[in-house]
Amino acid sequence: MEPLFGKVRFSRIGVRLAELHNKGYRWQHEAVIAFAAPQRAFELSQEEAEEWYRGRDVYPQTAPGQDETIVTFQGVPLGLAKRVGSRLKNSYPRELVRDGKLFLPARCEAAQKMRTFLTGAFSPH
């Protein structure tokens, strides 16, 4: 970041963690993606992950134990879901929703390699 100071104009630096709402705080999608602990997350199948990216709720065969959970695909955080009965309510930002073919095997492997690299690069030594 330091090489960019003075060359790029920043309005704010950092990641917004949450917003205040009537019933408390609501986590921001960017914070969930950046700081998620995938080992405590709920893993989605490829079909469920595609539905997730299309902005649809997901109906897994086994629901997670907690009311709010981080959903992942191949260990990569996708976002935050709220359990409502047997479904996971999608909180994926509407401006990011996509249709069509979303996953190719090579992309999934590349995403996992990038996640492994970033985890190692930014972990405390």
Image (cartoon, rainbow, N blue to C red):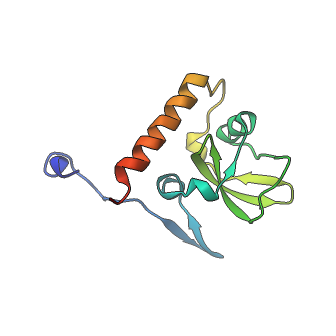
In the picture provided, is 54 more to the left or to the right than 65? left
* Image coordinates for residue 57, horizontal then vertical, percent: 76, 47
Q: Is residue 79 above or below residue 21?
A: above
In the picture provided, is 87 more to the left or to the right than 5? right
Q: Residue furthest front?
A: 125
In the picture provided, is 7 more to the left or to the right than 111? left
Q: Is residue 123 above or below residue 45?
A: below
* Image coordinates for residue 32, horizontal then vertical, percent: 53, 57
Q: Is residue 58 above or below residue 104?
A: below
Q: Residue furthest left?
A: 6
Which quarter of the image is occupied by the C terminus? bottom left
* Image coordinates for residue 24, horizontal then vertical, percent: 61, 76
The structure residue drawn at horizontal position 56% and vertical position 41%, both measured from the top left corner, is 96
Q: How many numbered discs sit on the rendered protein? A: 0
The structure residue drawn at horizontal position 47% and vertical position 42%, both measured from the top left corner, is 115
The structure residue drawn at horizontal position 62% and vertical position 33%, both measured from the top left corner, is 98
* Image coordinates for residue 70, horizontal then vertical, percent: 63, 56
The structure residue drawn at horizontal position 71% and vertical position 43%, both measured from the top left corner, is 44
